[in-house]
Image: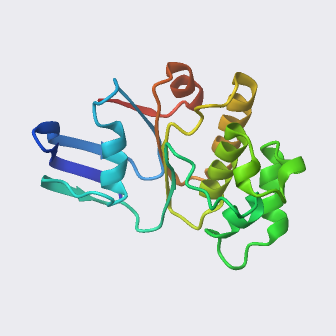
Amino acid sequence: MDILFEKVSKRFGDKTIFSDLSLRISKGSLTVIMGPSGCGKTTLLNLMMRLIEPDDGEITGVPSRKAAVFQEDRLCETFNAVANVRMVCSKGLNDSIIISHLVQLGLSERLTVPVKNLSGGMRRRVAIARAMLADADIILMDEPFKGLDDKLKFETMDYVKKFRNQRSLIMVTHDREESQYMDGELIIL
């Protein structure tokens, strides 16, 4: 089922973010959302995650099993990378698979270190691996590649494309190069 926004409005106090927004996001698509700061990109993701509710209108078709990469990494600081990813995986997923994903993201030397001791870019890649390995039908990503140098950014984007596995993926970015490289359906707010 496609995700439908039908005449959705959202306000925060006196500020209107959306008014009568209608859009369709195809099931199984890779969708990139772009627009200027403050236009509502993060709000759109938060509405799909049901972290906030619309003031008017209706949103339908969002799968109930969701994974997310937020602008902040939202990791459990005292857990290591493997434990942070393990938290969202199905019980049957072997730790060797988690380790394999983290190694592909360049974290082989830092698997057992508490994530509070990792660099920002390493923490970001743990958050991305966690979302990609989550038992979810849709992946929502809010500026997932920020803070990564160019080489790591492209390697991580390749990883995301490789392991999306036909799941719907909706990504917010300010970066036109990321948008073009991910090669998804583009929504400009």
In the drawing, does residue 151 fall left or right of residue 169? right
Would you say residue 146 is visible in this rendering? yes
Would you say residue 2 is visible in this rendering? no
Where is residue 119? Give x, y as percent.
73, 40
In the picture, the quarter occupied by the N terminus is bottom left
Where is residue 154? Give x, y as percent.
69, 29
In the picture, the quarter occupied by the C terminus is top left
Q: Judge by depth and name the residue closer to the eye, 45 or 170.
A: 45
**Residue pictured at 19% horizontal, 54% vertical:** 54
Residue 151 is drawn in which quadrant?
Answer: top right
In the drawing, does residue 126 fall left or right of residue 46? right
> For the view shown, which residue lies furthest in the bottom direction?
91
**Residue pictured at 64% horizontal, 57% vertical:** 130
> For the view shown, which residue lies furthest in the top direction?
177
**Residue pictured at 82% horizontal, 56% vertical:** 113
Where is residue 78? Give x, y as percent.
70, 63
**Colouring convention used in this rendered image of the protein:** rainbow
In the drawing, does residue 60 fall left or right of residue 178? left
In the drawing, does residue 136 fall left or right of residue 10? right
